[in-house]
Image (tube, grey):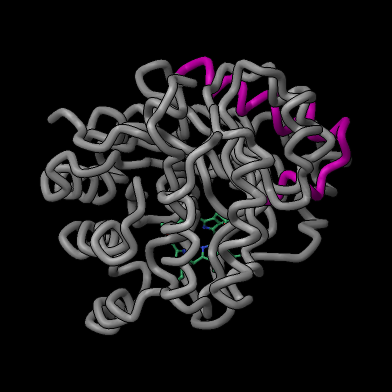
Amino acid sequence: MTLKNDLLIRAAKGEKVERIPVWLMRQAGRILPEYRQVRESVSGFIELAKTPELAAEVTIQPVDILGVDAAIIFSDILVIPEAMGLPYQMIEKRGPWFENTIEKQSDLSKIRIAKPEDDLAYVLDAIKITKERLEGRVPLIGFAGAPWTIFSYMVEGAGSKTFSKAKKMLYAEPMLSHQLLEMITESTILYLKAQVKAGVDLVQIFDSWAGILSPRQYEEFGLKYIQQICDAIDEVPITVFAKGAFFARQGMGQLNCETIGLDWNMDVVESRQLIGGSKTLQGNLDPCVLYSSHAEIERRTIEMLQSFGGHQHIANLGHGVYPDINPEKVKTFINTVKNWRAN
Ligand code: 1CP
């Protein structure tokens, strides 16, 4: 099916576009009352994600209701640890929790390389249904966590402010760390290739915890594995979003990907210099701007658009949209981008 709106894909490839495309990280499953209604019809997040019909429905909601230029498949980065043998639960108001974690060498025997066609068939089915229902209106984004971020959850067993257990393993057991990262990387490559085969038009790699590593650690345990993923996926454009990794922007510029996501702490002009001219940049409005007035959102969005210069840019927030943001404020952000033209 050819895409009727392919702004995102053309912008990712660095082609000239009539206007800047816009979508929001975490646009599905957070802010819309229509989402909450669907969510209440099931036992929780995991059941929703594992019911392809419903996952497709909430994936498409932001396209219909907010008017974004892309859909992102409703799932989670934590499906990979589960497919490798570490199931998780989502505890209401607290987040993910793993009963089993990786602490020592012998724990590697508890896990395996994921087989996406079997273990993650529910995500692939949701992608197929979503693609059918979208009828080419906008591209569908697939995603996975970066190996370091997935490693963090597999070692820590839950969310954390510092992920010090995971970070400790990098220093104390570098060989074990590399073995685990290799298994995650291999699983992730298979998973992203399966998503592409099921129909996604672009993939994004989320390295949400990149910013807690030192530059040296990130080079050795972070970027190295992202590079392997980028080298393996050549069917669709790739976006790499490494939250907080301002210190690694030069290295990100060398990745074999099309787009680099910027968080709101990264100065746009400086990022362009460090990353180089060959990549499209995505971002980077502070998500908290959406708590301000409509007029202020418009003003700051235009400032953000101007700083990117009107080309090789995909408009987004600098991280996921917060759950308590008013959808009308989100629409102001989206419509401001859609109405803006570079001089
Ligand atoms: O865009 C979308 O909304 C699509 C679905 C999506 C995505 C892209 C979900 C659904 N999760 C994610 C990515 C994700 N999940 C990331 C990377 C992006 C980011 O940094 O925000 C991370 C780190 C997670 C892990 C995760 N899942 C957390 C964070 C925990 C922590 O360590 O602080 C939480 C709270 C979840 C649960 C989750 N994932 C998605 C939803 C809708 C929910 C809420 C679950 C519920 O309804 O109870």
Where residue 48 appears, as percent x and y from the top left, is 28, 68
Q: Is 155 left or right of 42, judged from the image as shown?
A: right
Task: Identify the residue at image location x=34%, y=46%.
Answer: 70
Tell me if residue 281 can be seen. yes
Tell me if residue 102 can be seen. no
Q: Is 62 left or right of 253, judged from the image as shown?
A: left
Give yes or no for residue 188 being in the magenta stretch.
Answer: no
Where residue 221 appears, as percent x and y from the top left, is 74, 32
Q: Which of 219 and 154 is in front in this view?
A: 219
Q: In this view, does 279 lie above or below 121?
A: above
Quadrant of image for the N terminus:
top left
Q: Which of 130 and 333 is in front in this view?
A: 333
Q: Nearer the viewer, residue 272 or 46?
A: 272
Q: Is 38 left or right of 14, judged from the image as shown?
A: left
Q: In this view, does 289 lie above or below 312?
A: below
Q: Is residue 75 above or below residue 91?
A: above
Where residue 21 appears, as percent x and y from the top left, is 42, 41
The answer to which image quadrant residue 202 occupies is top left
Give yes or no for residue 230 being in the magenta stretch.
Answer: yes
- Give, as a single range, the part of the protein colored magenta: 208-232
Where residue 273 appears, as percent x and y from the top left, is 78, 24
Task: Identify the residue at image location x=63%, y=69%.
Answer: 296
Q: Is 55 left or right of 128, judged from the image as shown?
A: right
